[in-house]
Image (cartoon, rainbow, N blue to C red):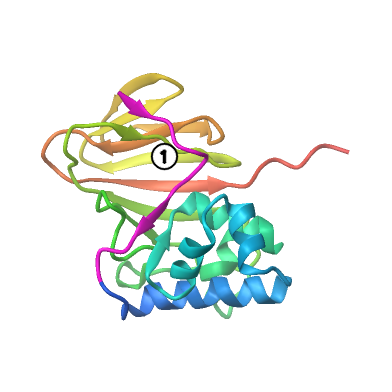
Amino acid sequence: MQLRPRDSILFPCRKHPGNPDVEELGASLRRLRMEAGRSLAEAADLAEVTKGYLSKVESGKAIPSIAIIQRLASAYGVRPGDIFNDAGENPHFSLIRSGERRAVNRDGTELGYVFESVGYRMRDRQAEVFVLTMPPVAPGPKLLYRHKGQEIFFVLEGRVRWLYAGAEYVLEAGDCVYFDAAIEHRGEAEGKDTAKALVVILPPAQPRP
């Protein structure tokens, strides 16, 4: 049986507060909320989460999913990348060395997934680019995700079980899917080995004049 949650879900931290990445993310979200003039209750309602959970996110006690970050960014009138931005000196170029990746959720989700941003130094970027690490998961009900925009999912290592719009696929290293992210989807490691993928999230297309 597959679970069909609301558009997105928040993931609790596995560790206690004190992780600087988690605290920095929470502080950034709180600052943007205040600058947008949104109350905690208003922001939580727009993100479709509880007020208490958003409070935990802002205090570094919980980590939002990428989908929730997108909802909050929309509510605050900013791009998702502005929440964890660290623009470099060159506005037209971003170089992220292998050891400089910025983990959006270093403690991982309840599945141990970790998203690492590899494009955060690019100013005015139109896409968010991550390296996604997916450890093996136990069999059981699967949460499906959806968010606005389009997404590219390119398998770097391992094998991935891919669910999309009710269909199931097995992806190998080098395989790539490009899809409408508003339709429910999910990727997970297939078998006993960790899988990695390059994930590119694109904003919704602007209507033509």
Depth check, front residue: 137 or 129: 137
Residue shown at the point (51%, 69%) measured from the top left: 84
Q: Residue flagged by tag 1: what amino acid is it?
A: Phe
Q: Which picture quadrant has residue 161? A: top left
Q: Nearer the viewer, residue 131 or 50?
A: 50
The residue indicated by pointer 1 is: 153
Q: Quadrant of the N terminus?
A: top left
Up the image or down, 190 lies above or below 196; here it is above
Q: Residue at (37%, 70%) from the top-left corner? A: 61
- Left or right: 22, with 206 as reference point: left
Expressed as whole percent of the image width and height from the top left, the position of residue 118 reads 42, 62
Residue drawn at point x = 48 percent, y = 47 percent: 200
- Asked if the magenta segment contains residue 158, the reply would be no
Left or right of 198 in this view: 160: left
Residue sitting at 58 percent across and 80 percent down? Answer: 89
Viewer-closest of 152 and 68: 68
Residue 122 seen by the camera:
no
**Count of numbered badges drawn on the protein:** 1
- How crowded pointer 1 is (Cα within 10 Å; few <14, some 14-19, many 20+) is rated as many
Kindly state the secondary structure of the residue where label 1 is placed: strand
**Is residue 184 depicted above or below 155 in this figure?**
above
In the displayed orientation, state which residue is furthest to the left. 192
Q: Which residues are magenta?
A: 1-15
Q: Which quarter of the rendered picture does the C terminus lie within? A: top right
Instruction: Find residue 37 and report its horizontal and vertical position in percent.
Output: 73, 72
Quarter residue 77 falls in: bottom right
* Side (left or right) of 48 relative to 136: right
Q: Position of residue 73 (x, y in %)?
A: 62, 60
> Is 43 or 35 nearer to us in this picture?
43
**Is 9 inside the magenta-drawn segment?**
yes
Tell me if residue 126 can be seen: yes
Question: Where does the image place residue 180, in percent across and percent down from the top left?
Answer: 55, 32
